[in-house]
Amino acid sequence: KAGVTQTPRYLIKTRGQQVTLSCSPISGHRSVSWYQQTPGQGLQFLFEYFSETQRNKGNFPGRFSGRQFSNSRSEMNVSTLELGDSALYLCASSLNSGRLETQYFGPGTRLLVL
Amino acid sequence: SQQGEEDPQALSIQEGENATMNCSYKTSINNLQWYRQNSGRGLVHLILIRSNEREKHSGRLRVTLDTSKKSSSLLITASRAADTASYFCATDNALSNTGNQFYFGTGTSLTVIP
């Protein structure tokens, strides 16, 4: 099976712009989670989508949003970019949404905000 | 925050030696998982241990879990240069209601010297 894919892999934006990142989960997986990784804060949970519904949301401002399509592909959007949004954004998929699910991560999208 | 902490933050060993890293967390959990990340790439799932398990093995990996101390350890035996990576523990929160919200530790950076 193909793994989790994320596009684009690298992105450079300027402050105030918005950005959309895409994640295609492993075939058959219905849960997609998003994480932000920075050197200072480490890996932080953004949100999880399951069957097109947001199930969990981390402690991020409303500028961070996401959605999931009927084919389980997911997008996350960050509006009004700030310098501090520069990070590696990781997407993870799992078969279902549950406590014992193993999450499979994509390679990430590295976002640089200038 | 339930974010765990790994100890040590960095570890450097010779090839063939064993590497041990520890993870502490704050709340009750259902499971704990260990992941490996190579230099700013996606995370690779290594092993999952459930809260009712005390020890688990997978190849050269041995994981222990002590829920009374809220801690886990990952032992990599007979290390190889290819094991050079950052290692993270991730936990769920047994007190939360739903979903795949995982909390990652701060990571241990392991360097295996050939």
Image: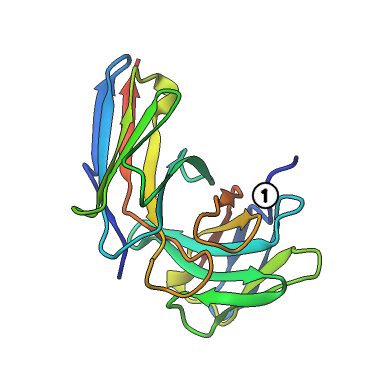
Residue B113 versus residue A98: which sits nearer the camera?
Answer: A98
x, y percent for residue A58: 46, 74
Q: Measuring 58% from the left and 50% from the top, which residue is drawn there? A: A105
Residue at the far left in the pictured view: B69
Callout 1: helix, strand or loop?
A: loop
Q: Most extreme residue toward the right, as rendered? A: A71
Q: Is residue A5 left or right of residue A40?
A: right
Residue B99 visible within the image = yes
Q: Is residue B18 left or right of residue A93?
A: left
- How crowded pointer 1 is (Cα within 10 Å; few <14, some 14-19, many 20+) is rated as many
Query: Up-down: is A25 above or below B98?
Result: above
**Residue B18 drawn above or below residue B9:** above
Q: Position of residue A87 (x, y in %)?
A: 48, 61
B108 w.r.t. A77: above or below = above
Q: How has the structure been colored for display?
A: rainbow
Residue B91, above or below B37: below
Residue at the spot 76% in from the left edge and 50% down from the top edge: A27
The residue that appears at 40% across and 21% down in the rendered structure is B81
For the residue pair A80 and A62, the one nearer the viewer reads as A62
Please state the horizontal and vertical placement of residue A46, each as a whole percent of the image.
50, 70
The residue at the point 51 percent across, 62 percent down is A35
Quadrant of the drawing holding the N terminus of chain A: top right
Instruction: From the top left corner, tell me how far across and down residue A22 is, in percent.
Output: 69, 63
Q: Note whether residue A66 is visible.
A: no
Quadrant of res B91 = bottom left
Q: Chain of mark 1?
A: A
Please tell me in which quadrant of the rendered image residue A96 appears. bottom right
- Amino acid found under the numbered disc labelled 1: Val
Which residue position is annotated with label 1? A4
